[in-house]
Image: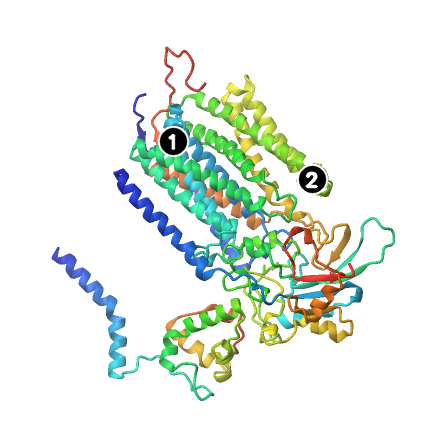
């Protein structure tokens, strides 16, 4: 193996050009599109209208999306969950609650750290997990500020009485709230929002945050809605009132 | 050297046997034992049968990418479109797949009654 | 300097066969553990939705660190001009390659879907440290291997060039590995710009410790002449690297502890973290850093091979604990969704998590060590990696021993 300088330079140039082709091609074809300036799907949730012991949204999500249940609480999977809260250090403070799910951020740390773009942003702002591509490295779970994601740590048998319109999952991938993209694409609301409305509480409002005519945008204009951990700069698409 | 060349020729001939067998069968019309699929319920499929036989994986993959990444509804080209006319996987997908020994992992997640 | 003669080891002693059989059996634990993981899912480990990264990742970053440490030591003679270490250049670069291969196995077998191994190679994501590292680790492995080949060919020019390239990319690999955690701005115990450089420092100290142990035992077992001043020289180097590591740990923790918003996180690690606090002060600081540094740099113990070996073992285990303390405690702390509020949920919000290394993960970790040991034993038997003797020539005019530079 006796390289002369010219031969090495030629080889090096070809190798460098070769390595550049992959990323350039990926950037042009394979990378996920950033959220279009048009639609930005999100929610406004009013904690004041959310009864502490109500779990309608959680139950509806589980049923709609066949979310697996595991007996061990530390392995159990959650797409949406009820969070109860009260101020620290205040004696006898009343406990209140709100539902939390993936906030479909505009700068999602999960999508940034995913090595294969299995987590990506759809043009309408929904952050999706492509379970066909997920390698199960769990970097996204580590990076998410809102504990929105779950890893499928046991093999899952599709339930006999499950929802046939939503696929199941293999073990070894990550999943989370999809903002019911399958329903949204057909013009419906997410299952949790529909269930909340059915209880009469109407604590959850879903819509296009960029559409000034939408109910969600109207609530944002009241100035009473805020994001969780806005300081992190992730720009979540779910806002809360009454916190 | 001659022995080597002869060995290579014999090897290539043996390697080509399945191809010759299949081409011969399709030319002469002799059956190879490949299963015949039951007719679907609808009038016609998204594409014709021989195209589908060769390319259904590519079609489904593209539909999947568009559906998952762009939110484009799959309609007739997606799995639910297939189920509408071919309601049983055992008489459709699984028939050819088990004949050729392919086991795609679609069914670990996607609902398609057997 | 006389030309160094490299030969294969005899490899026919009972001790050698015993070593190979034992390391093969231990190495077999890795595929058993990995298969169990693949078939049953991560439920068989201690990893949960709260602590998604466990011992496999700890092992991966540990092996990467050891690999770079070995590589830098190999480059000492080819790149940094310390010709007295030339006899070990091949051995050290062999170890570097074996360790990075084991590290890649550690990473990939821990994925939920390792059967999708080709996917990262077709979907490069420039903003993902994992994706960047995939390029860095593989390039590093390739260059390390080519460097080993150049050493074999005794091509001094290319040894120097490839050695330099390997050192440069080793810096990239280590910064990248530290950055995996350092870039995670959500968790206070991860988010630190010091993680990339401190990673390199610990890699150098653990790499030196590994080299001390392997050199001593390999030359001892094969009965080849070996100048003990190599051990004491490397020991002093290890001591200096440890001081750098201590400095980084000190600065990181003091800086972090200064901000009130970090009081809970910092005091978890340093005071209230139960076993994590014990691992930190007892395992890492005392056993892993202070005692080995004292032993290595003290003039009495520093010139005794026995004490240096003890210090090296303590250092090796200590750095493993350091990697553990990088990965795990940050996941134990609850995420603050609503600062100032107490939160609870069915998803364990607001709670400190729990993690303990499961049997499968112990098998996984031991199996990785077994793979490296078996590969090493095989390589020195199959190829002339080992110099027939490693003696330092004392030049009468200089009047000083070769190790004291």
Q: From the image, which quarter does the C terminus of chain C lie in?
A: top left
Query: Can residue C244 be seen here?
Result: yes
User: Is C392 or C244 nearer to us in this picture?
Assistant: C244
| Percent position of residue A197, x then y | 74, 74
Q: Is residue C149 above or below residue A83?
A: above
Q: Residues within 10 Å of mark 1 (few under 14, many from 20)?
A: many
Pick the residue in front: C176 or A206: A206
Residue C342, horizontal then vertical, whole percent? 77, 52
The percent position of residue A97, horizontal first and vertical second, equals: 77, 61
Let me know if residue C288 appears in the view.
Answer: no
Q: Secondary structure at mark 2?
A: helix
Residue sitting at x 50%, y 76%: B79
Disc count in the image?
Answer: 2
The residue that label 2 is drawn on is C266
Circle number at residue C89: 1
Q: Are marks 2 and 1 in contact (CB under 8 Å)?
A: no
Type of colouring: rainbow
């Amino acid at each position: 193996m006796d390289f002369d300088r010219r031969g090495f330079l030629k080889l090096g140039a070809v190798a460098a050009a070769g390595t550049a082709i992959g990323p350039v091609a990926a950037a042009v074809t394979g990378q996920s599109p950033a959220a279009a300036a048009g639609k930005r799907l999100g929610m406004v949730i009013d904690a004041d209208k959310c009864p502490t012991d109500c779990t309608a949204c959680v139950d509806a999500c589980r049923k709609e999306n066949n979310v697996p249940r595991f007996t061990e609480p530390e392995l159990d999977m959650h797409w949406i969950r009820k969070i109860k809260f009260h101020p620290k250090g205040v004696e006898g403070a009343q406990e209140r609650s709100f539902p939390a799910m993936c906030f479909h951020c505009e700068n999602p740390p999960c999508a940034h750290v995913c090595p294969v773009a299995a987590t990506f942003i759809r043009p309408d702002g929904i952050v999706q997990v492509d379970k066909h591509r997920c390698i199960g490295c769990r970097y996204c779970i580590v990076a998410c500020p809102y504990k929105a994601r779950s890893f499928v740590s046991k093999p899952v048998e599709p339930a006999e009485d499950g929802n046939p319109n939503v696929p199941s999952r293999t073990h070894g991938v990550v999943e989370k709230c999809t903002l019911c993209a399958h329903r949204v694409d057909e013009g419906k609301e997410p299952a949790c929002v529909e269930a909340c409305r059915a209880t009469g509480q109407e604590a959850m409002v879903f819509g296009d945050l960029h559409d000034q005519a939408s109910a969600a945008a109207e609530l944002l204009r009241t100035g009473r809605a805020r994001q969780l951990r806005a300081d992190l700069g992730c720009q979540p698409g779910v806002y809360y009132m009454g916190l | 050297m001659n022995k080597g060349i002869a060995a290579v020729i014999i090897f290539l001939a043996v390697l080509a046997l399945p191809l010759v067998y299949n081409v011969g069968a399709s030319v002469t019309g002799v059956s190879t034992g490949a299963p015949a699929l039951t007719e679907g319920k609808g009038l016609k499929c998204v594409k014709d049968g021989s195209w589908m036989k060769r390319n259904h994986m590519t079609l489904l993959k593209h539909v999947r990418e568009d559906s998952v990444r762009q939110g484009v509804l799959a309609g007739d080209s997606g799995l639910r479109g297939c189920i509408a006319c071919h309601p049983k996987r055992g008489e459709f997908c699984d028939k050819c797949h088990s004949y050729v020994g392919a086991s795609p992992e679609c069914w670990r997640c996607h609902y398609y009654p057997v | 300097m006389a030309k160094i003669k490299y030969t294969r080891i005899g490899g026919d002693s009972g001790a050698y066969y015993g070593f190979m059989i034992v390391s093969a059996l231990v190495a077999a634990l890795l595929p058993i553990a990995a298969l169990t993981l693949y078939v049953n899912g991560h439920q068989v480990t201690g990893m949960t939705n709260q602590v998604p990264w466990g011992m496999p990742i700890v092992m991966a970053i540990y092996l990467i660190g050891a690999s770079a440490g070995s590589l830098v030591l190999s480059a000492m003679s080819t790149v940094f001009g310390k010709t007295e270490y030339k006899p070990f250049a091949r051995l050290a670069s062999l170890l570097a390659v074996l360790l990075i291969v084991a590290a890649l196995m550690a990473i990939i077998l821990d994925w939920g879907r390792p059967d999708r191994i080709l996917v990262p190679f077709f979907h490069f994501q420039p903003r993902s440290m994992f994706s960047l590292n995939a390029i860095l680790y593989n390039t590093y492995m390739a260059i390390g291997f080519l460097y080993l080949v150049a050493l074999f060919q005794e091509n001094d020019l290319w040894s120097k060039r490839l050695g330099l390239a390997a050192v440069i990319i080793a810096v990239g690999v280590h910064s990248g590995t530290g950055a995996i955690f350092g870039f995670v701005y959500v968790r206070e115990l991860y988010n630190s710009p010091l993680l990339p450089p401190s990673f390199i420092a610990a890699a150098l100290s653990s790499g030196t410790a590994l080299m001390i142990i392997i050199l001593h035992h390999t030359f001892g077992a094969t009965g080849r002449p070996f100048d003990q001043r190599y051990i004491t020289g490397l020991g002093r180097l290890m001591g200096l690297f440890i001081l750098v590591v201590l400095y980084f740990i000190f600065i990181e923790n003091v800086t972090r502890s200064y901000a009130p918003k970090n009081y809970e996180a910092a005091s978890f690690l340093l005071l209230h973290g139960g076993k994590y606090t014990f691992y930190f002060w007892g395992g890492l600081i005392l056993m892993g850093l202070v005692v080995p540094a004292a032993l290595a740099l003290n003039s009495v113990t520093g010139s005794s091979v026995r004490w240096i070996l003890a210090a090296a073992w303590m250092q090796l285990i200590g750095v493993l604990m350091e990697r553990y303390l990088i990965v795990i405690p940050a996941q134990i702390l609850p995420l603050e969704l609503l600062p100032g509020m107490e939160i609870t949920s069915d998803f364990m919000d607001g709670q400190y998590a729990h993690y303990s290394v499961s049997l499968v993960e112990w098998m996984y970790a031991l199996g990785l060590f077994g793979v490296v040991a078996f590969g090493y034993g095989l390589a020195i038997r199959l190829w002339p990696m080992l110099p027939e003797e490693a003696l330092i020539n004392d030049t009468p005019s200089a009047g000083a021993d070769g190790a004291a530079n």
